[in-house]
Amino acid sequence: MIRSLLSTAASRFDTAVGGALLLRRSRPKGSQPDPEALGHAARMEALALLRSIYDLPEHYELGFFQTPAPITPSITRVRPMGGPEPGTVLDLTWPSRFEPIAADVRERYLSHEANATAAARLFLHAGPARPAAILIHGYRCGQYRLEERLWPVQWLYDRGLDVALFVLPFHAVRSHESSPRFPGSDPRVTNEGFRQTVLDLRALVSFLRARGSEAVGVMGMSLGGYSTSLLSTVDDHVAFAVPIIPLASIADVARAAGRFVGSPEEQRRQYEELDAVHRVVSPFARPSRIPSDQVLVLAASEDKITPVDHARRLAAHFNAPLETFHGGHLLQFGRADAFRAVGRMLGRLGLLSRR
């Protein structure tokens, strides 16, 4: 009875506030007219132009994603790490040497100076490096104080993992704006944002491996779950992947938010065209580069923002198990059970030093 009431509350909360939290419309000053204000014919013409930039055969090779150069981050000591095992908390920043593919969006994209610096907060054990988990936040999140409460950082640390909180492009310390530009209503910014996400994540994975971590995996919530899934189709060095309440399709979320106009047939065509524009950065565009037994997908049964079908499709693509917990996207009442499943997978992989 209590579980049913909690699940209902979580579902209603998702419905009430979810539209403001994912793919929120944001039009920075000086940008081009909002494509969502266009009619069907104009939308189809604009989307066809974007397909000519991104939906090209050569872009489905891994060369579409930049290969990161080794990084030497600037390091700031934050505080000692609490708990029974000594350690330290460090903030890392490094140049994100990203170059957009779309020439007509390059100047606007790169003019956002804060986004040119990648960032992560590390929770490191004293002594030799341990296996590491990179945690990727959701849309409109990424503030370190918030993420330390949303993620079981101490729980992972106490089980022997080094932990990193990664900041997505145009979020938190990488933005001076209240509403992130990525992802947004301009598909070019969304695609370029995912390319930059992969670049910066690969740089962090390589850095952690170079400092001695024998295995580096990724976990991500919502937009971070999409990023986790995408990285897992690009980088051979990811040791495990856990997409949590993941987004799986930009076009699906746009459709659920009522972003298409016109007759049902016109809306269907707009959906298909937008899906094709984003296909190049879709987790479904390439096979997984991680063995299926090193992937676990977690979903909330009453999620109304990225419903269970998103997680189910990703689990099928990765041929990986799907664990469902009660609660919603925002009020994740049963999340402790889900993370116990994560602990079991990491233990089976031999990555935990203590129970």
Image: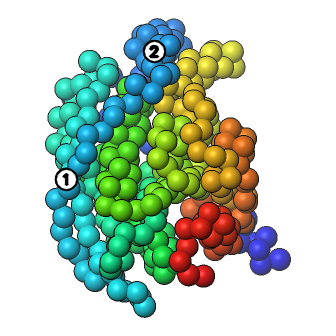
Residue 225, image x and y in percent? Answer: 54, 50
Residue at 49% of width from left, 55% of height from top?
218
Front one among 151 and 92: 92
Q: Amino acid at mark 2?
A: Glu
Circle 1 packing at 10 Å, graded few (<14), some (14-19), many (20+), is few
The correct choice, above or below, for 249 with respect to 76 in the image is above
Residue at 62% of width from left, 63% of height from top?
349
Badge 2 is on which residue? 58
Circle 2 packing at 10 Å, graded few (<14), some (14-19), many (20+), is few
Residue at 55% of width from left, 20% of height from top?
276
First-in-chain label (1 vs 2): 2
Badge 1 is on which residue? 72
Q: Residue furthest right?
A: 1
Residue 266, image x and y in percent? Answer: 63, 15
Front one among 98 and 28: 98
Count of numbered tags:
2
Looking at the rendered image, the quarter that the C terminus falls into is bottom right
Colour style of the rendered protein structure: rainbow
In terms of image quadrants, where is residue 188? top left
User: Is residue 84 left or right of 313 when viewed as pictured?
Assistant: left
Classify mark 2: helix, strand or loop: helix
Q: Amino acid at mark 1?
A: Thr
Residue 108, image x and y in percent? Answer: 22, 29
